[in-house]
Amino acid sequence: MGGSSDVPALRNGLAVLRVLGGRAGPVSAAAIARELALPRSTTYHLLTELEAAGFVAHLAAERRYGLGIAAFELGSAYLRHDPLERLAGPLLRKLVDLVGHTAHLGVLHGNESLYLVKERPARPETLVTEVGVRLPGQLTASGRAILRHLPAAHVRALFPAASAFVLRTERGPRGLAELRRTLSAEGRLGWAVEDGHVTTGFASVACPVFDHGGRPLAAISVTLRHHCPEPGGCAETWPELAEQVRLTATELTTRIGGQAS
């Protein structure tokens, strides 16, 4: 094989992999053909070639197809190169220089927020959110920015009992019903806000980063010093700051080939 005539086949093969990667389970050839508007004969040919290369696994008993071991190996190699962190670093630096506050890239690890990248202003303030630190996901703005884009059943599975709701201060959701109300309110707002939930005297805003399937992959957050004596926190949502965070998250989504849900 060679030459420009192979380009459409390559594009179609990659499109098949995107379909399989975007589904929660195996997919039939007929469903793939419909979604990509391809003839069934072409779809079967592509699946056969991809299966031979190890990128697709044929589940004969179910008459469906899923991703193969080669796709897993490729994904693992991608993660080893830390592309998300590498791409996020310069964007976070630019954001910090613009807003003058500490910025983070965080992901959800189980029901905890895990911080991957941290950029600080010229005069940094001491925060607990260091790279590698894990915090209760329902408390952090970055965690809730991701949680509000997950299915309700997924959120329930992450927080199955009251014991899952660990608090650091007197603020933050204490149960699933309260968490859902908070996520719903932040959904209407357009970004996540925490005011003293993680550390007294500090607040954060966060927006999600999406993968190619529109799923929340990570979140970018900015933390600022803010003390509110009210027990439940202030009504401040920092819209101007949140807009800069949103623009940065959107740019990172674009750079990784993602698409907002």
Image (cartoon, grey):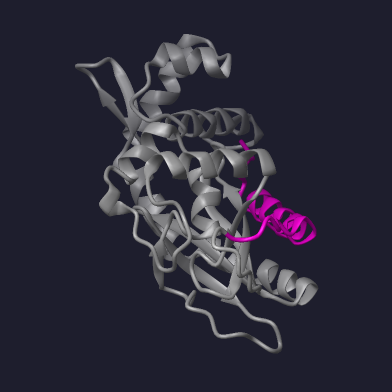
Q: Is residue 183 left or right of residue 158?
A: right
Q: Judge whether residue 55 can be spotted in this image.
A: no
Which residue is at 59% across, 51% downward? 209
Placement of 28 over or under 238, stated as above or below: above
Q: Classify residue 233 by image quadrant.
A: bottom right
220 or 203: nearer the viewer: 203
The quadrant of the image that shows the C terminus is top right
Q: Residues in magenta?
A: 233-261
In the rendered image, residue 108, in percent from the top left (x then y), is placed at 43, 55
Q: Is 69 included in the stretch rendered in magenta?
A: no
Q: Is residue 255 magenta?
A: yes
Q: Residue at x 66, y 34 (%)?
A: 4
Report if residue 154 is visible in the image.
yes
Compared with 188, 94 (above or below) is: below
| 116 to 39, vertically: above or below | below
Which residue is at the far left?
A: 61
Q: What percent of the width, then of the height, locates residue 50? A: 39, 32
Residue 11 in which image quadrant: top right
x then y, percent, for residue 207: 63, 53
Q: Where 11 sits versus 179, above or below? A: above
In the rendered image, residue 196, in percent from the top left (x then y), is placed at 54, 67
